[in-house]
Structure formats: C-alpha cells, structure tokens
Image (cartoon, rainbow, N blue to C red):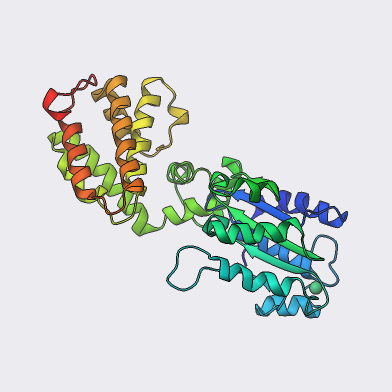
Amino acid sequence: MNWYPWLNAPYRQILARYQEGQGHHALLIHALKGNGESSLFYALGRWLICQQPEGIKSCGHCHSCRLMMAGTHPDFYQPEPEKGRLSLGVDGIRQIIDPLYNHAQQGGAKVVWLPHSELLTEQAANALLKTLEEPPERTYFLLGCREPSRLLPTLRSRCLYWHLPSPDEAVGLQWLRQQGIEGAEQARTALRLAGGAPLGALELLQPARWAERAALCAGIGNALARRDFLLLLPLLNKDKDDEPLYWLLSLLTDALKWQQGATGFMINQDQLQLVSELGTRYQAGALHHQLHQWLGCRQQWQAIAGVNRELVLTNQLLNWENGAPDGRTHPWTL
Ligand SMILES: [Zn+2]
C-alpha cells in the first residue's frame, strides 16, 4: 500500500499511545476523501498485529507480518457489505464479533478495520457498540468515517476520535508536482476543489475528469455570451454525479470573492477570466440568490428518491437565464 508524507506525523502521534500501552481499543478517524487514511489504518493495523515491531515499524518478517502481506491473516477482520448491498448489516458484524471472544489464532492481537462506519445499519452499530463496551482482550477496532454526525452518538462516544486534516496546501502542491502534475494554477485549483485532499486532487486532474470540468467552465462562458443557459443542461445532468454542480457552486462563490477583491482565496485559480465575467455581470444579491437556488436544487437531488433531475435542472437554468443581474426575478419565474 502506498505511503504519503502527510501521514507521518499523525502516524507517529497515534502510535505513541500504543507504544506507551495507552492506545485506545477503538480508534475513530475522521478524514475527507482523498487524504489516504486507508494507508494510515493499514500501517497501524500492521504494527498492532506484528509480533516483534521495531520502533514505529512492523518488522516485515515475523509470521504475522507475512500473513498480513499475503492478505490472509486470520485475526485481521475487514467486514464489508454483502454483495449488492450498500449497508453493512447486523449479520456481517455478528460473524466477526463471535470469533473475537476466542483466543487470537496467531496468539497476538486482533484487529477489526471498518473503513466506512457510516455503512453500519443501526442494528449493526448497536451490536458493535456492545462489543466496544466490553472489548475482548487485545482486540483493536480501527474505524473510519467521512461524516461523524451520521454515526450513532453512543458509538462515537465509545471511540477515541481523531481528525485527520488535509495537509497544508504547500505539501499537497509539492506532492502533486512529484506525481508529474504540471501547472501550479491547475494543481492549486484541483487541490482546493478537493478540500485540500491531495489524492482527491490527483483523481480530479485525470485527463477525462479535468476535461469535463473544462467543458463546464467553457459552457458557462458560452451561456453568458449567448444568454442561453439551457446549453448547460447536458454538462450538469450527469447520472448520480453531483460534482459538476459543485464546480458551478464554487464558481459562483468565487465571483463573490472576486467582487470583494479576495482573489487569493478563490478556489478556481485557473478560471480568473470566467470568474471576473460572472462577478461583473451579476451583483452580489443575484449571486447569493443563484447560490441559494442551486443549493436547493442539490438538496432535492439528495433528499428525493427518483427525482427528475432534468426537470429540476431545466427549471433552475431558466430561472437563472431570466433572473435580473441585480437579483430580482421576473414574477413568472418564481
Ligand atoms: Zn512482524
């Protein structure tokens, strides 16, 4: 598994507690997608399960390390949703809980790694909770989550919460350069769109994905020039892909920053021309109105199952087209 430089400090900090024998049996790491927390979990799991760790590293040659490298360690559990299911049910959790109360098959520690705790059904989370309250001997739970608020508060309270922040922008930029990304403005933009997460930025910078964003930006420029906003419909109407809408929202907020002279804080550093066009064409009130409308649109997508995206988008684009630059809208568009 790959290792990333921004994980060094958190790895050492978390491990120090285990080295002192004070490590918590349940660790909950909260991280944004694209910060490489899987590598951090794996390294911690390797160290906990290694029979002769050398300082902060697993030895790499004991029987446990060899089983881990082969992906066949019997005391390393990684419960996943059943095939075709999006959530992790109580049966899947019970299957791993029972053997935890037996001796470890390799005589060392047992590790349960749950990368996405949000996938637990309420019943499964309650079953896990009971185990966390009375943990079996030498058993460690490594839990990951993107949104702690979606977890049962009782489950959260049983874990040691650890927030893994995105690295400083300079660190992310340097890493992207090492991955062969050229163009500081592009790299900075992708990094900011990904909330500072370097792996997220790299994914976004892949040619096909980056071209989709470029097409949306060009499309907004065209829509403004021709006053035909329905041109944006195919660029925004992507099946279950909300990111193009997020890109649009980021351009609208950037236009507000541009109006305030805060260009250094803009996300889309590679689209100054487009942002200044938006900032010139619309007054702040109109931009706020659009932002509000688009957020409502996204909420409908997320909250209503089977919503007709095309209809919602068409309505919103026509509202934008007919909206006055000062934020007022014609009565018939309301
Ligand atoms: Zn080892």
Q: Quadrant of ligand 1?
A: bottom right
The x and y percentages for residue 204 are: 42, 53
- In-front residue for pair 331/9: 331
Whether residue 286 is situated above or below residue 47 in the rendered picture: above
Residue under the point 59% across and 56% down:
36
Is 161 situated above or below 327?
below
* Relative side of 189 to 310, left or right: right
- Measuring from the top left, give residue 266's x and y in whole percent: 43, 32
Where's residue 3, x and y in %?
64, 61
Identified at 29% across, 26% down, the residue is: 289
In this image, 85 relative to 323: left or right?
A: right
In terms of image quadrants, where is residue 248? top left
Query: Is 194 on the left-hand or right-hand side of 23?
Result: left
Give the position of the N terminus as an image quadrant. Answer: bottom right
Q: Residue at x 62, y 45 (%)?
A: 153
Along the line of sight, the residue nearer the viewer: 333 or 221: 333
Near-viewer residue (179 or 237): 237
195, above or below 1, in the image: above
Q: Find residue 178 and report its image quarter.
A: bottom right
